[in-house]
Amino acid sequence: MKKIRKVRPRTVKKVRSKKGVRRVTTKRPARKKMVKKAAPVSIVRAQEHFRGILETQLARVTRLKKAQDWIDYAKLKPIVIGILGGDGIGPYITGEAQRVLEHLLEDEVAKGKVEFRAIEGMTIERRAEVNKAIPDDVLVEIKKCHVTLKGPTTTPKKGDPWPNIESANVAVRKELDLFANVRPVRVPKLGIDWMFFRENTEDVYALGPFGIEVTPDIAIDFKLTTKPGSQRIIKLAFEYARKNKQSRVTAVTKANVVKTTDGLFLKTFYEIAKQYPGIEADDWFIDIMTAKLVDEKRRREFKVMVLPNLYGDILTDEAAEFQGGVGTAGSANIGKRYAMFEAIHGSAPRMVKEGRAQYADPSSVIRAGSMLLNHIGYVELGSRLGMALDICGQYEKKLVMTGRSTGAAGRDFCDYILATIADPNLAARWQEYQLA
Ligand code: IPM
Ligand code: MG
């Protein structure tokens, strides 16, 4: 194409003098020097900030690409189980879960194969005092354990009375590289049998504390997706489907709008799917997926779902509601070296303030305990505990928890679970409910 040169125009001035009006053409104005204006300080600051993020993430991706082997619990003696009470209702419900685990693993502890270790200090008061998501000494103790059972911990938000520190859950997940958040939801009488694989270390969570207020009028957060980060969670979901004879894996994104990051997640999903020709792979957008979980006919068709962090957070709360609420669903945070098991709900400080903490439902953190048993190789014990939880919380419901003195206390509910586990007919009792 021909380049069109802009000609700097001459200007014509009319000059009046005794001789009349004359037209005078002025000289062309001097060529303006093309001096680039310096960017405002706010932009330079934001650019520097972004550079820092990119450097950290490039180094992280290099680390992720170096495959690490999965820890083998069978070879460990002892397997160290850390117990973190958390805050709010955390110490109450985690105490009950610990009671169940110690009972089930009594022989293993006696043999020296398993050791329980209480870890103090993961409370909002202490975290606020040191102004850190995880106090340093607590992190050192966590890293000395192979797996941890963690009670809920308060996550401050802007405007709360606490300093706006990062969520302890999110910090532990990132610190121990617990990339898979595995959340099962089963309600046989509704035909629901879902397993969610929520990516746990990326997305908007990864850089949650690293957003930037460019000016008082502009705030920007960052959403991060990496290829190796997506590959490992998607692979885990397909492997689970293969081992558990599930015929379908569904990815959930918003790749039609969030094109770059969700786009990469989805592209990676279909690349991995090719390695599993016997398993059907499909994808849904998060909005319609949220709707389809309440569609009685369609929802039973979903089995294994894999999704980025935030969509996974939201969808699993919705899913848990079918099972009796977030108080009933457990959550496993799995990495190759460490694993942490927790309730999926928050610390409910209001219950403590109103003197109702003893009525908090321990089911979610006990469910997390059954996932812990399963994960470290005590599959039979984990499954017994899972069946007892189903019977007590969903089927038989001899005791009902309401979160108040109108219902059972957490301690009584835990005794009910222990009595149910002890029943030699437990499996048959559970099986009957599956057919009902
Ligand atoms: C969860 C919780 C956490 C999350 C909060 C407490 C930070 O909602 O485990 O789902 O968003 O991951
Ligand atoms: Mg959540």
Image: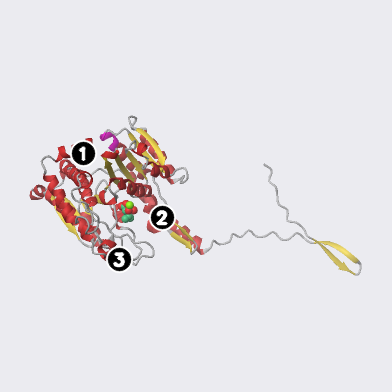
Say which quadrant the C terminus sits in.
Answer: top left
State whether residue 282 appears in this view: yes
Is 125 placed above or below 298 here? below
Marks 2/1 in contact by CB < 8 Å: the verdict is: no
Q: Marks 2/1: CA distance?
A: 52 Å
Q: Disc 1 beta carbon < 8 A from ligand 1? A: no
Can residue 242 be found in the magenta stretch? yes
Tell me the number on the disc at residue 53: 2
Percent from the top left, x then y, of residue 365?
23, 52
- The residue located at (23%, 49%) in the rendering is 368
Percent from the top left, x then y, of residue 350?
29, 62
Is 302 placed above or below 35 here? above
N-term mark: 1 or 3: 3
Tell me the number on the disc at residue 433: 1
Tell me the number on the disc at residue 128: 3
Picture quadrant of residue 157? bottom left
How many residues crowd mark 2 within 10 Å: few (<14), some (14–19), many (20+)? some
Of the two numbered discs 2 and 3 in the rendering, the one whose residue sits closer to the viewer: 3
Q: Amino acid at mark 2?
A: Ile
Q: Amino acid at mark 1?
A: Tyr
Q: Marks 1/3: CA distance?
A: 46 Å
The outermost residue toward the right is: 19
- Magenta segment's dominant SS is helix
